[in-house]
Image (cartoon, rainbow, N blue to C red):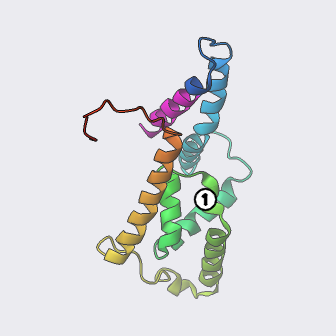
Amino acid sequence: MSVACLGADVLARCLREQLSGDVRGLARRFQRELSSETDLPWRLATTEDLLFPEATGERPFWFGAMRWYNRKLAEVSAYDTAVYGRWLLVLHLMRKLTTCFAPAVVLAVLGHAARHALLAPQDRACAVAGPLRKSDPATRARLTSCFTRAADEQRGRARGPRSRRPRPRGQAHA
């Protein structure tokens, strides 16, 4: 459903930008923009499938590195709400994948990996200190504000500039 909504947004934008009455090139432009918009969900879905050894298909050259990074990102997300919030925004298709490669996130992931590598093997299983709890009000507040900000930005971008029509006299503001 999320991908269908992304497609509807792309179609609406293409139709808005199309010269009135002239549909030449509309289908080609829509398909091009749609493919770039749905690239992230497609990659997320197909690379997850490749984690299973039974899955057929060629693993891209970057597959091993991305698998390692995603695993470490998930570990860091267990105790770092800023990283967790960014990761959720990507998984919910509210931000681009590059959000997970912002300098602060990369440093958190690499720092975690370095600390984890220095631990004794028996201590690695218990390495994540203070995992997030759903019942933690501070965590919930940070994540809620992160999603609220992102949703507000999305709505503002989708609507574009508003045109105001004059209200007939005597009509109250709804």
In the picture provided, is 145 more to the left or to the right than 16? left
Say whether residue 8 is visible.
yes
Classified by dominant secondary structure, the portion drawn in magenta counts as helix
Find out whether residue 129 is within the magenta segment. no
Find out whether residue 4 is within the magenta segment. yes
Vertical position of residue 49 compared to residue 118: above or below: above
Span colored in magenta: 1-13
- As helix, strand or loop, the secondary structure at mark 1 comes to helix
The answer to which quarter of the image holds residue 16 is top right
The quadrant of the picture occupied by the N terminus is top left
Residue at the limit of the structure toward the front, as seen here: 169
Q: Residue at x 61, y 53 (%)?
A: 97
The answer to which quarter of the image holds residue 108 is bottom right
The answer to which quarter of the image holds residue 71 is bottom right
Say whether residue 93 is visible.
no
Vertical position of residue 20 compared to residue 160: above or below: above
User: In the rendering, at what x and y percent does residue 65 appear?
Assistant: 69, 60
Q: Residue at x 49, y 46 (%)?
A: 156
User: In the rendering, at what x and y percent does residue 84 appear?
Assistant: 49, 67
Q: Residues within 10 Å of mark 1 (few under 14, many from 20)?
A: some
What is the three-letter code of the residue carrying label 1?
Answer: Thr
The quadrant of the picture occupied by the C terminus is top left
Q: Residue at x 31, y 29 (%)?
A: 168
Q: Residue at x 59, y 81 (%)?
A: 116
In the picture provided, is 13 more to the left or to the right than 130? right
User: In the rendering, at what x and y percent does residue 17 appear?
Assistant: 61, 26
Towards the viewer: 128 or 164? 164
User: In the rendering, at what x and y percent does residue 96 appear?
Assistant: 60, 51
Q: Which residue is mark 1?
A: 99
